[in-house]
Amino acid sequence: MSDFVNVAVDGMGGDNAPFEIVKGAVEAVNENSHVKVFLTGQADKIDSELAKYTYNKEQIEVVNATEIIEMAEPPVMAIRKKKDSSLVKALYLVKDGTCDAFVSAGSTGATLVGGQVIVGRIKGVERPPLAPLIPTANGCALLIDCGANVDARPSHLVQFAKMGSVYMESVMGVKSPKVAIVNIGAEEEKGNALVKETFPLLKNCPDIHFIGSIEARDIPAGLADVVVCEAFVGNVILKMYEGVGGILIKKVKEGMMTSLRSKIGALLVKPALKKTLKAFDLEQYGGAPLLGLNGLVVKTHGSSKAIEIKNSILQCITFTEQNINQKIKEKITMEEN
């Protein structure tokens, strides 16, 4: 058995494939000697990109795949018809046990469908959620769900809370992570029908640290470690985060260039400011894991650059070494018993 954590990477998925995908894979293996990347895609194009870099050849293997699933294709049809696509071939590497994890910047729909249909759900998991890490004043929080289940039921949200707690404790090292449900107020009686029905279930759940409701403005303050919501709300929160963060960084940079005095000041504060702003760069946190599957599936942004691909690959190492799937199975089994 290999000592490597084996990660299948969709080499043709995303706006910047294959060059940024390949670059990210090379950076990952050069940073960590315990990971092996299986790059799926058109071998001639991937090999051409790999030729630009120096890396341990034992840590990257190219798996030829002639087809590409485009962003606009109907996910179910694409998964069924394009068996020789880079995305489908990579998912089958996880299904057959060759790889521990899968990373793609390609079609979100195809990744979600393929993850459930090919890799399969852990027994007892009703709906696998997408769960990205988002920056907060205290480090980061897990936003769960951000895009997989827009019509979730209360029982789904309870499972999200449990899976999110396992992830934050085992992967991020947060002891007894604080869990909150997104709401329009702090009072228990507030919210829509889904939140009102879910709140008492979370409140009476013995194996999570539930702290109640959280308003959107309190998420960046880091009041909760696991932020639970259905996917429509979660996706709005995530996109607002990305938009405000990008504009804020842009405005800070513009403000520092307005006068000679501000430019001198910018030179003095640049090292400290760069470190602070880096903490609020979503690319630093890698992709969003689709939790609750028999193998790890990680979805990164379609516009991902090498740094996000690299970090997505590296996060697979901790996930695998901490045996997150087994811990999720145990949590769900406790629920059934």
Image (cartoon, rainbow, N blue to C red):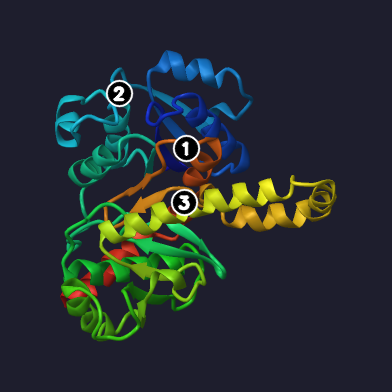
Q: CA distance from mark 2 to mark 3?
A: 28 Å
Along the viewing direction, whichever of 307 and 320 lies nearer the viewer: 307
Residue 108 location (% of width, % of height): 30, 41
Q: Quadrant of the N terminus?
A: top left
Identify the mark nearer the N-term, 2 or 3.
Answer: 2
| Nearer to me, 37 or 126 | 126
**Front residue of this view, candidates 216 and 150:** 216
- Residue 68 is tagged as 2
Most extreme residue toward the front, as rendered?
259
Q: At 29% across and 61% down in the image, what residue appears?
A: 233
Q: Are marks 2 and 1 in contact (CB under 8 Å)?
A: no
Q: Measure the C-alpha gap from mark 1 to mark 3.
A: 13 Å
Look at mark 1 in the image and give the residue it sits on.
Answer: 304
Position of 263 compared to 97: left or right? right
Badge 1 amino acid: Ser
Q: Which residue is mark 3?
A: 242
Q: x and y percent of residue 51 in the render?
A: 57, 17
